[in-house]
Amino acid sequence: MKQHKIWLSSPHMGGTESDYVAEAFDSNWVAPLGPNVNGFEKDINEFLKGQSNDNYHTAVLTSGTAALHLALIMLGVQRNDAVLVQSFTFCGTTNPVVYQGAKIAFVDSERDTWNMDPIALQEAINALLGQGYGIPGKKEAQGNKGYIRAIMPVHLYGMPAKMEELEDISIETGIPIIEDAAEALGSSYYGRMCGTFGTMSALSFNGNKIITTSGGGALVSHLLKYIEKARFLSTQARDNAPHYQHSVVGYNYRMSNIVAGVGRGQMEVLDLRVSQRRANNKRYRDYFSKIEGVELQSEPNADYFSNFWLTAVIIDPAKTGGIDREYVRLEMEKENIECRPLWKPMHLQPVFEGSDFFGEGVCVELFEKGLCLPSGSNLREDEFERIFEVLNRIFKNESI
Ligand SMILES: Cc1ncc(COP(=O)(O)O)c(C=O)c1O
């Protein structure tokens, strides 16, 4: 008989979520507004502020994808425009650009963090300017081309991108950053929380994330005007009138007070979830330190702090005696243990065939060799034993 399934990353409730949800029922706040919505936003602002003097504003929404979509709308992204997006990501980053009808120029990753390569980004900007794209307030667009409206880096698996270099390019060129921090709540870079970089940032509370509301997301900004506008747009853009009046097209993207109740409970355990995921990562790191040919995604130095949402490894068959990531994945699958290849780069996806890609193809190599290992904060001791048993068999490791 098959043993129970070990998931890559499953929801992990803290215990108080149902109290907040019950409160919503008891007080009949069963709507996309109410005390849990306000409380969850406040909790996120406080968490992101940390010990800093900066203030952040948050609008909780139905998903991280919705947050990115609203950010693009507010930066004026439309048909004929271009957006620079990290290719190595999930489709939640790219799809909202397509909803707006804009072109995506895909940017490669660098090897240190696996995130947007500043050199490839600069190359992409130069190429788009050469094609006639403009930059709002800086350079007029030519012919039928529009404007380069945004740079979208991602912190993959929780690892902060090289934000200093990316911000330098953003400041120099005048192209704003929309930070995709969907996987990186609890990570930080030079002491600053992921989710606070750029003009606007997106968080996700999807079922597999470090904290979850079953489904949900948030838009964060240090500029209140964007968050107020996000609240307006996400509730169908109703003008101030007694009847229903609309001067612009809106969206039904606001988080409900029930779902936000789950979020409030989850915020109480966020720090604990980060330490649990990091402890998982340390366990794998210790294990693979004795195995030739397996490298983990790693913090380049002490200024990078990853929540290690998922532990990801690169398996080089040239050094492991032919063992590759697919072999490991399938051996795990036989034992009912879920592992996943890294995100398939978006420029390789059939839906984006023929798109521009800038870089040497680092993300392609990482995809071919990379695997995410079970990383849930609720992994039990007996489950780790099962995982290491399979790894021992694969790598003929008898020392553990
Ligand atoms: C990098 C990245 N961007 C965007 C998203 C979209 O978030 P959501 O699923 O909440 O729409 C996700 C996750 O799902 C993600 O991993």
Image (cartoon, grey):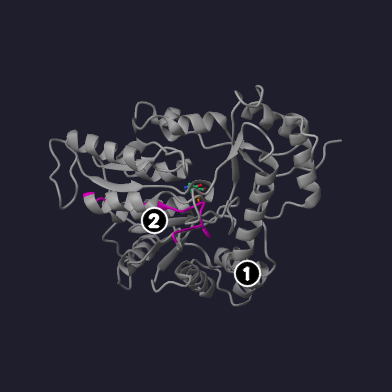
The front one of 315 and 363 is: 315
The front one of 299 and 267 is: 299
Q: Which mark is residue 251?
A: 2
Mark 1, ligand 1, within 8 Å: the answer is no
User: Looking at numbered disc 1 in the image, what kind of residue is underneath it?
Assistant: Val
Mark 2, ligand 1, within 8 Å: the answer is no
Q: Is residue 161 above or below residue 15?
A: above
Disc 1/disc 2 C-alpha distance (Å): 25 Å
Residue 95 sits in quarter: top left
The front one of 354 and 33 is: 354
Residue at image x 30%, y 72%?
A: 241
- Which residue in the structure is indicated by mark 1? 21
Residue at image x 19%, y 38%?
A: 129
Residue at image x 42%, y 39%?
A: 110
Principal SS element in the magenta part? loop
Q: Is residue 20 left or right of residue 90?
A: right
User: Looking at numbered disc 2 in the image, what kind of residue is underneath it?
Assistant: Tyr
Q: Earlier in the sequence, mark 1 or mark 2?
A: 1
Q: Secondary structure at mark 2?
A: loop
Q: Is residue 182 left or right of residue 376?
A: left
Q: Secondary structure at mark 1?
A: helix
Q: Is residue 148 left or right of residue 165?
A: left
| Residue 83 forms part of the magenta stretch | no
Q: Is residue 8 visible?
A: no
Image spot of residue 303 (x, y percent) = 47, 57
Image spot of residue 108 (x, y percent) = 39, 36
10 Å crowding of disc 2: few (<14), some (14-19), many (20+): some
Region of the chain picked out in magenta, as a range: 173-190
